[in-house]
Every structure is written in structure tokens, then in C-alpha cells.
Amino acid sequence: VTPRPAHAVILAGGRGTRFWPLSRRRRPKQLLDLTADGPLLAATVARIEPAVPRERQWIITGADLTEGVVDALPAFPRDHIIGEPIGRNTAAAVGLAAAVLQEQDGDVPFAVLPSDHLIAPALTFCSALERALEIAGHTDLLLTFGIAPTRPETGYGYIEAGPELANAAPARTVVAFAEKPDRATAQRYLSGGRHLWNSGMFVWRAGVVLAGLRQHLPQAVEPLVGVARAGAPGTARFEAALKTAYGDLPSISIDYALMERAANVAVLPAAFEWNDVGHWIAMRDLWPRDSAGNAARGRVLALDSGGCIVYGPDRLTALVGIKDLIVVHTPDVTLVCSADRAQDVRRLIEELERSGDDRYL
Amino acid sequence: VTPRPAHAVILAGGRGTRFWPLSRRRRPKQLLDLTADGPLLAATVARIEPAVPRERQWIITGADLTEGVVDALPAFPRDHIIGEPIGRNTAAAVGLAAAVLQEQDGDVPFAVLPSDHLIAPALTFCSALERALEIAGHTDLLLTFGIAPTRPETGYGYIEAGPELANAAPARTVVAFAEKPDRATAQRYLSGGRHLWNSGMFVWRAGVVLAGLRQHLPQAVEPLVGVARAGAPGTARFEAALKTAYGDLPSISIDYALMERAANVAVLPAAFEWNDVGHWIAMRDLWPRDSAGNAARGRVLALDSGGCIVYGPDRLTALVGIKDLIVVHTPDVTLVCSADRAQDVRRLIEELERSGDDRYL
């Protein structure tokens, strides 16, 4: 049988709090134009179009973000944008996508992709995606893309890859998933050559995911299948069913709920460059740099200053005697953050939430 | 004889480049509202009014700044604002003032005051000013206010004070003027108890200043007397004469030209608090401080950050893991400067001038 054309589901529900003050509740990271190439979400949609055309792409986002998503992608089919009434982590979003696709198009292969990563070259990625969708079409594998580590990163989960699967090359067996490691362990993973970064990009068939969730997260499956059967996305009946069912779903990641528990997982080593744009430090590699290593969007006048990351497209940012700082200017907030504290930007948001001051959130 | 009522001449010609990016060519330090009490110049005018009413106050500023001065002081007598066609340092400005006063009102006592210092309490200062003007009325002294040092400051000139003058108490003889000292010398001055900071505030009579300049800077006196005789300030003849004469005057400070050369100098130890607001660091003592020692105009959210000086009245400034930085936000420029480099802010201006980019000057 000829496999049915594949779909792609883009997860666009996160907040990206580490990009505050540029990211806000209504303008999270995936809607930011961090690299002057348009919003990350729009770049994701465009990147995969050679492999999966727009009419078979889906976006799952927060209900409060759908307006922003439509603004960022005016030509995207409106009934393929699903707004979650409340965030319930990735297992719920993936389960919903699988149930909708199964209902709308049968047991089709589909990819699940974060909306806020940068991947290049696009065509290399599309080739990998097509091969993965092909494998998913003729096996019952739960495939994940693994990225060969280039540094002893402690902020990602790792996948230990085993031998190549004969009927699914270049996919490999998964020996184990490993939590975010400490520095020494990360260094060992890096030198060992068997560990890959867990990219959060998955490829599988709708029926395979539903079967896996039925086994490992059964309480989520029937409600989601019920939503998918209530009506097509975009209809009032679908929306109403979604609103009723979603809040009661368990909030758990698809990694914990399914990938780390299932036996039929496999990993595809990536041949493309991948950057998860995790926090401001990522911009060091993405923005133009001066000879002192200051990376900037916007004009910088640096006097005895180096290693800084500066966002201020509408202004001059002047630095005197400054090393390794993040400086971000927005119309109502200026952030100055030590580069080694980039992870702690989210703590400012917690602080603002505690103080009950919503103005800057 | 009853001495004639005294005048006050406020020197408002500087640029205050160390307060960039808030200070600009057309909005120098003396026109800035650094402390939320109005422009420093307006505060200076108001402070001395109990001692010298506004109708006997004069402001000498740059011709390109007179509009800004009028904006800052709409009620100030327009014909008492003299715009220098070009900056020629303080000897020229003081000589011009002395020549004008001599021509308009005879050999009157007058004070010369910078426009951009902070002094408190105002009434203590007014008492000191009145006493100084009284002494100047009945002696031929060139009086300067000296400030008792509170730290081993290397950025000021010092005056070594001698014994009190019997007919002019509390004025003291001047043993010597000392240039900006190195750290060890400054420490010695501080512990010795005989040295005072040279405040740049002078009190004397018009005729005494003119006589002193005639002796020590003769080439400046006749041109300035000529300007004063051409017409009253504000008349077209005065303006024309000023424009013709001013550019040829020597550019030298009144300290070098007169005070350090004349025999009839005396120093008045100040009983008031004085802050020359030399650069951003001065704001540490003038703005509200949080428990971590961050001084700010505008809201600050500080996470593990201390000793910072933040200007951003229209915004939230968020700091993460930051120590001892100056952060200044203006509509088109953000400055981030290490606190120990506050003096080097002016080097940014030199850099902008070199690049020929006037936009931020």
C-alpha cells in the first residue's frame, strides 16, 4: 500500500520566559523575531513546507495565543490552529493531535515539532523528516531525532543510541534515556560518542501514538478521542468538547509519559544543525559579533567591553568596561543580566507574579 | 557708606559630558532634572534668592543654550541671560560679568556660582554668601569657598588654608592652591586638616576682579570692557560687540588666570554640604537606595544585584547578578557602564564625535 501523505504538528504553547522582557504572556518566544528572519514559528512552518505542505500542517498553541499565531501566519489554514484552553504539557498536545489526525485522516504518519528551535540547512532537515515519516509509515516505531552533542551541555536530556535498526536505517535502538546530567556526566557523554541530545522532535503514526498512550497514559486517551470525535477542529462542537475535557488531563511531558516507558522507541541521529534557542546566550551564535565578541541586534558602541549580548534594535547601546552581560531593551523594560545567570531570567517573572504586578508579564 | 546691593553670576556654559546619554549638546547637565527637583540651574537660582534676589542674578551660558535656559527659567529676566558666542572657559565669563556689572552698577560685590552643583541647607549657604558679599564689600579680597574634604578625592583641586583674617572672619589666608593630587597626597590632605576642596564659587567686587585681570590677564580686559560699554546686555549693540570680541579671548580658567596668581586671595571654609554632581556615581547619594545599595530613579527589580546606579524613570529596569554598574536609559540610547569607569563616559562622546555621527551628541 502507498502510505498516506504525512502531517506535521507544531507545538506552539510555551511561554519562553527566559526571553523576558522581549517574551511576554501574549508574545511568547515562538512569536518573537529573534533573528530578524520573522517569528520562530513562521520560520518553522516555512522550513518544513518542502516535506509537509502547509495544508497538512497543524499548530497547537494556547487559546490566548491563537490571535498572535494568526497575526504571525496570516495565510495558515485557520482550522488547523488548535488553541488549548489551558496548558497541559506535551503529552496532552501530542495525544490531541494523534486523536484528531486518526479521526480526520486515519492512521497517518506525522511529525511533532517544537515551534521555537532553529534548524539548518532546511533541505537537509526536510530530507531527514521525509525519511523519518517513511520509516514511521512502515514500522510501529516511536521515532525521535537525536542531536550529536558539541559541548558538555547540562541543560538537555540525552539519549543513548544502540545499533542501527536494519529495517529502519538510519534509526537506531534506544539503550536509555538520561535525565539532564551533571557536568562530569555530560563530559563523559560527549567523549563517549554514544549519547545524543534529546531534541523534542518526534515522528510516528497516529495509531501508534494512541496505542502507546492507551498503554502508558490511559486516562488521557478516551477524553482526547472524544474531543476529536465531537467535530473537526474549528467547529463549535470541537471547541466545546476540548474546553470540557482538557482541564482534567494529566499535565506531563510526552517524554516522561510515553518515550521513556515504551519499548518501540528509536532515535534518528540528525545530520542537520540544531539550536533550541534556550535563552539569551544562544544569540551569541545567531547575531552579528564585533571583534570583542559582543553579539548584537541594534547598534553598539563598546569601550573596553566584550562578550556581551545586546538587544536594542531601535537604539544605541553604549558599553563601558563591561564583560559578559546580557542587555535587552524593550519599550517598557530594560534587562541587564550577568551572562552566567541567563537561566535565572525566569526568576524575575516569578518575582513579578508574586508581587501581583501583571504589567510586565 | 552703605555698600551697594550685591549681584550673583551663575555660570551655565558647560556640557556635562559625563552625564551622557542624558546630557546632550542642547541639554547639558545644568538643564537636567537629575534629582526630580527641577533642572540644576533652576535649583541654583532658587537656592540663592534669599541672599540675592532674581533681579540681581545673571546667567552666562552658551548662545546655543539660551533657549534651553529660558525654558528652564521662564520667569528669569531675559536681559540677564548672556549667551557666549563661543566657550572661552571661566576667566572670560567672569571678566565679562565684572565688566558688565561695573558698567551697569559700579564697583558692586558679586558672587560667581556654578549652575550645576547641589548645596544644602539653602539657608546656611545664603548666610555664608551674605557674609562673603559683606566681606567683599569692605575689603579688596578675591574670596573663594573651600569645602572641608570628606574623602581622599583625587578629582578636585585643593586649597591650603592659613590663619583667619582679622578683618574678614571667617575668611582665611590661602597658603597655596594645589592641583588635583594623587591618592596618597589626597589622603595626606584629608588627615592634615588644613586643605579644602576648591569649590569654584567666588565672591568679590567688580572693580577688584577687573584690577586683578588687568594685572594677570590684561589681553582679556579691554575687549570685555569694550563689550560692556557697547550697550546693556540684551541690546543688539552688546550682542554684536560680544560676538566680535569673544572669539579672540584667551581660553583659560579663572583659577589659573587669577586666583593662583593674585596675592589678595582668601578662602571661606564652608559650613554647608556641597556636591558637585561630577558624574553618575554622585547619584548614589542623591537617589533612593534599596537594601542592596542600588540607587535609582525609576523602578528597579534586582535579583542578586547591588551597588548599581539606575536611571530609567519611564520603565522597569531588571538586574540579575549585577554588581556596581551604571545603567542609564534615554529614549534613543542605553548606557551600561562599570561604576569604576564613570569618568570615561566622556570618551564615548569623543568616539561619537570622531565617527562624525551627531545624532546622539
Image (tube, coloured by chain):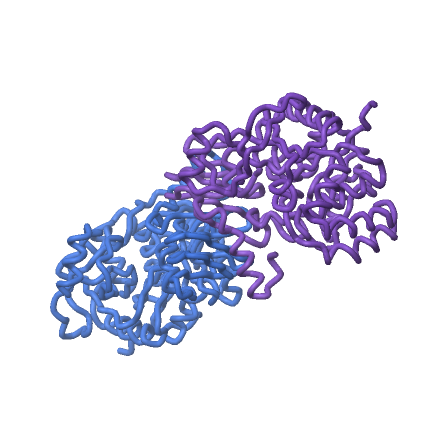
Chain colours: A purple, B blue
Where residue A152 sits: x, y (%)?
45, 35
Q: Nearer the viewer, residue B176 or B345?
A: B345
Where residue B298 sits: x, y (%)?
50, 61
* Quadrant holding the N terminus of chain B: bottom left
Q: Residue at x 83, y 45 (%)?
A: A233
Q: Is residue B29 left or right of residue A128?
A: left
Count how many numbered circles sit on residues in the image.
0
Q: Residue at x 25, y 49 (%)?
A: B218
Residue A316: tell me if it is visible: no
Where residue B132 sits: x, y (%)?
26, 71
Above/below status of A229 relative to B149: above
**Residue A321 in which image quadrant:** top left
Q: Is residue A231 left or right of residue B339?
A: right
Q: Nearer the viewer, residue B233 or B14?
A: B14
Above/below status of B143 relative to A235: below
Q: Is residue A278 left or right of residue B9?
A: right
Where residue A31 sits: x, y (%)?
67, 43
For this orientation, the residue located farthest to the bottom is: B2
**Residue B100 in which image quadrant:** bottom left
Q: Residue at x 56, y 56 (%)?
A: A349
Q: Nearer the viewer, residue A91 or A122?
A: A91
Residue A114: tell me if it is visible: yes
Q: Residue at x 80, y 35 (%)?
A: A107
Q: Is residue B265 left or right of residue A45?
A: left
Above/below status of B318 relative to B42: above
